[in-house]
Image (cartoon, rainbow, N blue to C red):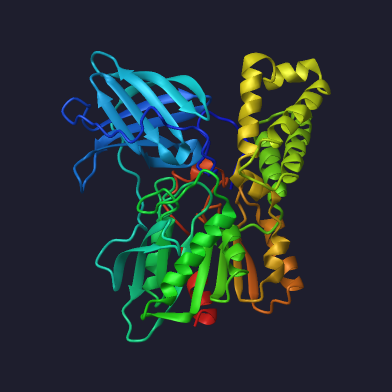
Amino acid sequence: MCTLGLPIITMNLNRTLIFLYLLFAGIYNLSAQTLPAKTTWEAQSMGLNLTLHIGEDSLTKEKRITLDVPQQAIINLKASIINFSGDSLRLFFKTMQSNYIAKFNTDKTELSGNWGQNGVYELLKFKRVATKPELKRPQTPKPPFPYSEENVLYYNKDKSIRYGATLTIPKSEKKVPAVILITGSGLQDRDESLAGHQPFWVIADHLSRNGIAVLRVDDRSIGETTGNIINATSADFANDVLVGVNYLKNRADIDVKHIGLLGHSEGGMIAPIAAVQSKDVAFIICLAGVGIKGEDITIKQFSDGSRKAHLSEEYITRMTALFSGMINLANQYTNYTDDSELKPAFAKFMEAWLKQQPVQFLNDAGFQGENGKNYINQLAGNIYSPWERYFNAYDPATTLGKITIPVLALNGSKDTQVSAKENLAGFDSLLTSAGNKHFKTMVMPGLNHLFQHAGTGETNEYAKIEETISPEVLDIITKWIQKYGR
């Protein structure tokens, strides 16, 4: 889910698009002859370890540059745009809305330049190091497959959005039940690629081996899917899911009475939003889904993260009051795309809040001077973005409180992003109040947000763990669908 921290690279958990990459404007101009061949480059910034991999796509033979930030579970994030000229290199990472403009030194052992994100730039220097071995991912599916696999394209009603997806279908003479997989927050591909893992591919493979068709879809503006992302919210993504439901309804090989939704993280919030709008959704599975108000999750993530960073209780108390005030203010303005009234209201609120804070605190928190203004503007950009405002205002009572179809909700006991205790309690309470007789909630011992067996559960472990998703979770999902999805 989304975070409120402001490192140079924010984790792929927020769909807000703030930085406009005008410098690149669709340019793709890569010289394979002069760009260093397969190499690895490392840098450090604000306590984060960054690694660039320059190599070659095994299929297209085109040059490929990827980024790793293990502490933020970013592994093999592909540069969307690569421009190389002489000794200069320009990269753009679409899913983070970040760009890097740099130059190689004479012997191409160093790469130095400016990293830009959210309108803020910082000098970042990479040094060439020995190429590291590829990560082991034993659960990644390998052919031959005992099911058919189709790459499909379909459109929404007015043809304004094209969806690129993969449909895996069991070999059967009968119509089969189907599940649409819904990714978590951030711009993600159909496999929900994260930290070098492809959990949605693993889930799809397991389900289709057990008689269940699976549709996994690229998010808006990623892969083969088009669509505007700048002002999009979870409600828009729920509409995207319903387009997928309609696509499956029109296939002769799908049992239209048994089409379900499986969402992870924000996807576990989107699934109920979609389900309350359609009688065609037969069941829901929420993995690390949202069972409490979005605002409560945002504040808890901030406070938990601050304590793990050993920040003072005074800092946490004062900043929590700031975030809560900003969120409450944003909730008063329901037009997400027009901030003409919100911006001056925010400026007035911040002026009042700053006057109430001790000078020493403002100095320690970095709110003084030009850097302080940039920091404040970044906070505003995050909290007042359309996606963030919708998420913080979300109340699951408006969805889970109305759902009577079968629901399965799982959370890992070591999930540090969407805590199991509060969110599963929310599912229990709201589904009970809805009169739902067919729901089950489970805490999965020792599992993290990705449902891997974990040590601490922190995000910096995701890439280190070879397991993509617990086999026990795969079995629970499969057996539950076989019971309620047929």
Q: Residue furthest left?
A: 33
Task: Answer left or right for 30 relative to 382.
Answer: left
Total number of numbered labels? 0
Residue 252, located in which quarter of the rendered image? bottom left
Residue 409 x, y percent position in the rendering? 61, 65
Determine whether 53 is above or below 390 in the image.
Answer: above
State whether residue 265 appears in this view.
Answer: no
Q: Residue furthest bottom?
A: 174
State whether residue 311 appears in this view.
Answer: yes
- Seen from the viewer's position, the closer of residues 278 and 293 is 278
Residue 373 x, y percent position in the rendering? 65, 20
Determine whether 357 is above or below 184 in the image.
Answer: above
- Seen from the viewer's position, the closer of residues 335 and 270 is 335
Residue 143, located in which quarter of the rendered image? bottom left
Residue at x-position 33% and y-position 36%: 26
- Seen from the viewer's position, the closer of residues 4 and 51 is 4
Task: Answer left or right for 400 relative to 90.
Answer: right
Determine whether 9 is above or below 189 in the image.
Answer: above
Residue 43 x, y percent position in the rendering? 41, 24
Task: Answer left or right for 139 relative to 312.
Answer: left
Residue 4 x, y percent position in the rendering? 63, 37
Residue 362, located in which quarter of the rendered image? top right
Task: Answer left or right for 228 relative to 338.
Answer: left
